[in-house]
Image: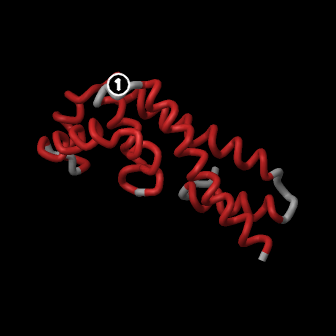
Amino acid sequence: MVFAPGETLLIAAGFLASEGALNPLWVLMLGILATSLGWFGAYYLGSWMGISWLRRHGRWIGVTPNRLQNTHAFLEKYGPIVVLFGRFVVPLRQLQGYISGSAESSFKQFYLWNILGAALWVGFWGGAGYIFGLL
């Protein structure tokens, strides 16, 4: 099994698609599916474990009560934009699904913006690899 950041894998897959080794449409579709499923899993984990788990154990990952309160206020105001572009911000990408679930954000809204954000993220990194391969 290969462990690598998603961006690295998408750039490589885009490059291979430009060389004809992979189908670009499959790279896009599977990339969106994989990254969306990861966030859906994190959303459900967050909604199942809830905010109380973060309050008890968040200090181990730098989540203080003050940061938690500020994050929830920020999500209330800018939730869709955070989900849409959160993939491009490294610490946010790892925690966004969980935080949205624990904040009891609307699943319908999360679903929509998660899919759109995944399409942007996969398109950007996979497209970068594809363009690089054409040069």
Q: Residue at x 78, y 62 (%)?
A: 16
Q: What amino acid is found at the position of numbered circle 1 in the picture?
A: Ser
Q: Residue at x 61, y 40 (%)?
A: 34
Q: Residue furthest bottom?
A: 135
Q: Residue furthest right?
A: 20
Asked whether 1 or 59 is in front, the reply is 59
Q: Residue furthest left?
A: 66
Side (left or right) of 88 relative to 57: right
Q: Identify residue for label 1.
A: 47
Snapshot colouring: secondary structure
- Quadrant for residue 33, please give it: top right
Relative image position of residue 103 (x, y in whole percent): 28, 30
Q: Residue furthest front?
A: 77
Side (left or right) of 106 relative to 22: left
Q: Residue at x 36, y 44 (%)?
A: 95
Relative image position of residue 105 (x, y in whole percent): 34, 28
Relative image position of residue 70 (x, y in whole percent): 18, 44
Viewport quadrant of the C terminus: bottom right
Where 132 sits versus 105, above or below?
below
- Quadrant for residue 51, please give it: top left
- Identify the secondary structure beneath mark 1: helix
Number of callouts: 1
